[in-house]
Image (tube, helix red, strand yellow):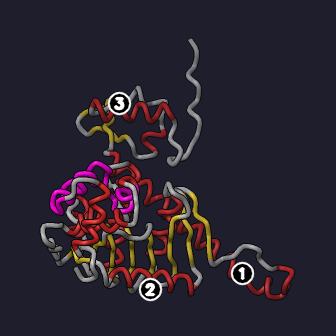
């Protein structure tokens, strides 16, 4: 009889295929036989399975959200430890570099750093937020909490945001109007305790985080897996000023909700769509800029056409201009 091959060592951040398959089956079936998992010690070490208190011969699965939260916290702690170590090394070498003069010049610009990967980005943001004592400014365009990355980010964000609020700092967040009534967005603010406010606009910038005007994070790629950590004072101040210019134009959504009025039967959302239509944008571009799906955009366009009495797309543009719904202050 052949002896089973030894299980290769790996960290919790790099789960093996066999372990994931057994964990998935345990989730479906409500548990796994302890003997079946004996050759996969990584499942217990990573906290994906735990002893079943009712049956010594079985293991029960830890809920994925809880397991992920524990892993991310452990990763964050390790990262913070390494950064403290880096800081001690930098302080130790600083006088040596001054002694060496120009020969020890660092080629890398420390004012802007590229952070790659969802995990490292979350860790860098968490590290920056541990020192926030005044305010955190955020722009969250078209947030999706239903996908795995959004759900993971939500788990991490709730803990670090609450810790920030408990230190007496405040949080200001801008969303798109399409998220004003999303249950998961509103539930987030109902759970947070402290000075947290949210407002919304038809269009916002791409994702932005500014922590105490000391450091900012902006995306460096379309898929959200690469970000820039910005520490240049002038750039950070520029981003914070941009945020507040949008903030004062935005509509409050939490803790005070302000309802946007319709004008002559045209809703605020239809006015936003009308503004982009007269600029010549396609339905797809309108949907992307307003954080909506293209089918919903077309439904609103049809309602707008009916309200204005338009019989064609070309006539609709003319009627929008003549109606005055896009006039400043309308």
CA gap, disc 3 and disc 1: 51 Å
Toward which corner of the image does residue 289 lie, by quadrant? Answer: bottom left
Say which residue appears at 18% left-offset and 74% top-offset: 260
Q: Which residues are magenta?
A: 285-309
Ranked by sequence position, the earlier of labels 3 and 2 is 3
Please name whichever residue, 238 or 291, is drawn nearer the observer in this view of the structure.
291
11 over 259 or under it: above or below: above
Disc 2 element: helix
Do the numbered discs 2 and 1 sit on residues whose CB atoms are within 8 Å?
no
Residue beneath label 1, please?
92
Q: Which disc is residue 241 wearing?
A: 2
Say which residue appears at 38% left-offset and 57% top-offset: 288
CA gap, disc 2 and disc 1: 36 Å
Q: Which disc is residue 25 wearing?
A: 3
Where is residue 143 drawn, in percent x and y? 35, 60
Please name whichever residue, 137 or 175, is drawn nearer the observer in this view of the structure.
175
Visible residue check, residue 152: no
CA gap, disc 3 and disc 2: 51 Å
Toward which corner of the image does residue 245 lie, by quadrant? Answer: bottom left
Indicate whether residue 287 is drawn in magenta: yes
């Amino acid at each position: 009889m052949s002896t089973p091959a030894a299980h290769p060592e790996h960290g919790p951040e790099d789960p093996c295929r066999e372990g994931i398959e057994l964990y998935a089956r345990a989730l479906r079936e409500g548990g796994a036989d302890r003997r079946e998992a004996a050759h996969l010690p990584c499942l217990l070490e990573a906290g994906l399975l735990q002893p079943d208190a009712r049956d010594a011969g079985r293991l029960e699965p830890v809920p994925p959200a809880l397991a992920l939260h524990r892993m991310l916290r452990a990763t964050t702690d390790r990262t913070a430890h390494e950064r403290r170590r880096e800081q001690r090394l930098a302080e130790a070498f600083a006088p040596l570099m001054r002694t060496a003069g120009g020969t020890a010049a660092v080629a890398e610009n420390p004012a802007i750093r590229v952070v790659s990967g969802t995990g490292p980005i979350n860790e860098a943001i968490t590290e920056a937020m541990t020192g926030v004592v005044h305010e955190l400014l955020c722009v969250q365009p078209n947030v999706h909490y239903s996908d795995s990355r959004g759900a993971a980010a939500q788990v991490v964000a709730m803990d670090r945001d609450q810790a920030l609020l408990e230190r007496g700092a405040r949080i200001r967040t801008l969303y798109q109007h399409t998220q004003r009534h999303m249950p998961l967005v509103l539930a987030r603010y109902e759970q947070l305790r402290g000075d947290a406010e949210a407002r919304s606009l038809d269009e916002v910038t791409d994702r932005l985080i500014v922590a105490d005007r000391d450091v900012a994070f902006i995306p460096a790629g379309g898929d959200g897996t690469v970000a820039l950590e910005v520490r240049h004072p002038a750039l950070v101040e520029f981003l914070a000023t941009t945020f507040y210019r949008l903030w004062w134009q935005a509509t409050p959504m939490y803790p005070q909700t302000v309802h946007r009025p319709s004008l002559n039967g045209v809703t605020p959302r239809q006015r936003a769509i009308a503004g982009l239509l007269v600029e010549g944008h396609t339905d797809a571009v309108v949907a992307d800029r307003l954080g909506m799906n293209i089918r919903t955009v077309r439904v609103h366009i049809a309602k707008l056409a009916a309200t204005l009495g338009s019989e064609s797309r070309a006539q609709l543009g003319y009627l929008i201009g003549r109606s005055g719904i896009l006039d400043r202050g309308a």
